[in-house]
Image: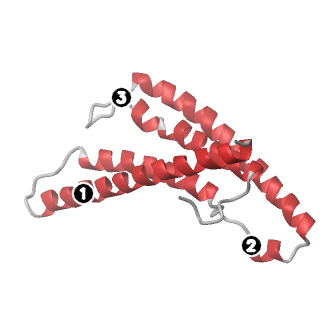
Amino acid sequence: MSVRAIVRGVAEWLEWVEQILIRALFLGLVVVVFTGVLLRYVFRVPLIWGEELSLFMFIWLALLSGSIAVRRRLHFRMAELVAKLPRPLRTSLDIAALLCMATLTVVLGWQGYNLAASGLAEQAPALRVPMVWVYAAYPVGAASMMVFLLEGFLVGPPTSGGA
């Protein structure tokens, strides 16, 4: 089996896992926010930890969704302008964009790791869970983005829009 096939297989599996997590997080977010609104405005009883939990789920949602956007190349770019350039220049710009994204992803991962390590000593005020569980979204999201960027370098973007 070639390296390209292995990288593609790992990327497809990773996106499949992330899509399951994203769906579960989104459903959980809707349930928590709806329950919080219902309790606050109908029963006049606030859900104290609901806002905190929804914020934590949203952080994970953003980083996991961002990594899938990296795989599908849905990030902001001037597609019309790039499409008018000659093919060699387009290829060079694609490589430059991937290198810039990889550099920023390494910074995100490194700083996210430092943040997660500091979260070992912190606790969420309402939920009383270690903040490392929240901050871990940054290095996990960055690692996922790096897998997808590696796939972009070695194999190219997925042809079917992902898993």
Name the spot of residue 126 as percent of width and height, x first: 26, 37
Q: Quadrant of the N terminus?
A: top right
Q: How is the image coloured?
A: secondary structure
* Residue at 44% over, 47% down: 60
Amino acid type at mark 1? Val
Residue under numbered circle 3:
130
Name the spot of residue 99 as percent of width and height, x first: 78, 48
Q: Is residue 10 left or right of residue 1?
A: left
* Residue at 53% over, 46% down: 14
Name the spot of residue 155 as percent of width and height, x first: 74, 53
* Residue at 19% over, 57% down: 35
Name the spot of residue 28 as percent of width and height, x first: 29, 53
Contact between marks 2 and 1 (CB within 8 A): the answer is: no
Q: Quadrant of residue 159?
A: bottom right
Residue under numbered circle 2:
79
Q: Earlier in the sequence, mark 3 or mark 1?
A: 1
Q: Residues within 10 Å of mark 1 (few under 14, many from 20)?
A: some
Helix, strand or loop at label 2? It is: helix
Label number found at residue 31? 1
Q: Residues within 10 Å of mark 3 (few under 14, many from 20)?
A: some
Amino acid type at mark 3? Pro
